[in-house]
Amino acid sequence: MAGIDPVAQKLLYSIMQFNKGKWRQHKPHGRNHNEIMVLGCLLHGMHPGERLNWQDNPPDFNHSFESNHPGLKVSEISALLRVKSPTITPVIRGLEDEGLVERTMDPEDRRAVRITITEAGRAIIRAAHEERMEIFNKLVEHLGEEDSLQLAALLTKVYTFFDSKVPQESEANAQGDDTP
């Protein structure tokens, strides 16, 4: 085992503390994280391979898909959110029960079901986004613009590291390859 680097240890504990923060318990407009993410996927009508990236491209809540937009399959939503379909199915069911999403038969494959966001779902995600933006505007006021931009850049680097480098190293180690 490698020696304990005090800087790495401090970083680890900071991230652990951040993950336990009360901000994670906040439910914007009464919705949990999974519900917001599903509605976000449907709002954009994205497909696997595309990334949910609102960092430089804020969501357009007023954009209406053409009537021929088929929506997304549960498997496509799961792929976008990087979770298994059984995780998303109850979320979609709950959103459907509340009239925030609709299920329709796929016109190309009658065995498949497509999920689309309703106007009520669009209103919920718009309100949740506005609520979150109020909180983050306060954070920018607290940190200042320069520190906020630096934090955003650092968090993007952290995400990129964990999203790309760590899985590659884990796969290589699982296959017995010692190369980084």
Image (cartoon, rainbow, N blue to C red):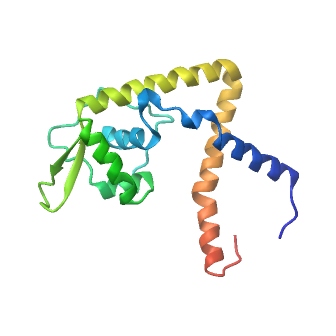
Q: Residue at x 81, y 47 (%)?
A: 10
Which quadrant: the N terminus? bottom right
Q: Residue at x 53, y 32 (%)?
A: 26
In-image side of 59 versus 110 (left or right) = right
Number of numbered discs: 0
Q: Residue at x 35, y 39 (%)?
A: 39
| Relative to 143, residue 174 above or below | below
Residue 76 in the image: x percent, y percent? 33, 55
| Relative to 2, residue 154 above or below | above
In-image side of 89 versus 175 (left or right) = left
Q: Examine the rendering and report whether any part of residue 60 can be seen.
A: no
In-image side of 34 versus 156 (left or right) = left
Q: Residue 22 lies in what quarter of the image? A: top right
Residue 92 in the image: x percent, y percent? 31, 47
Q: Residue 126 lies in what quarter of the image? A: top left
Which quadrant: the C terminus? bottom right
In-image side of 43 versus 64 (left or right) = right
Q: Residue 65 lies in what quarter of the image? A: top left
Q: Residue at x 65, y 37 (%)?
A: 21
Q: Examine the rendering and report whether any part of residue 178 can be seen.
A: yes
| Relative to 63, residue 173 above or below | below
Residue 178 in the image: x percent, y percent? 71, 77
Residue 150 in the image: x percent, y percent? 69, 33
Q: Nearer the viewer, residue 114 or 54?
A: 114
Residue lying farthest to the bottom in this orientation: 176
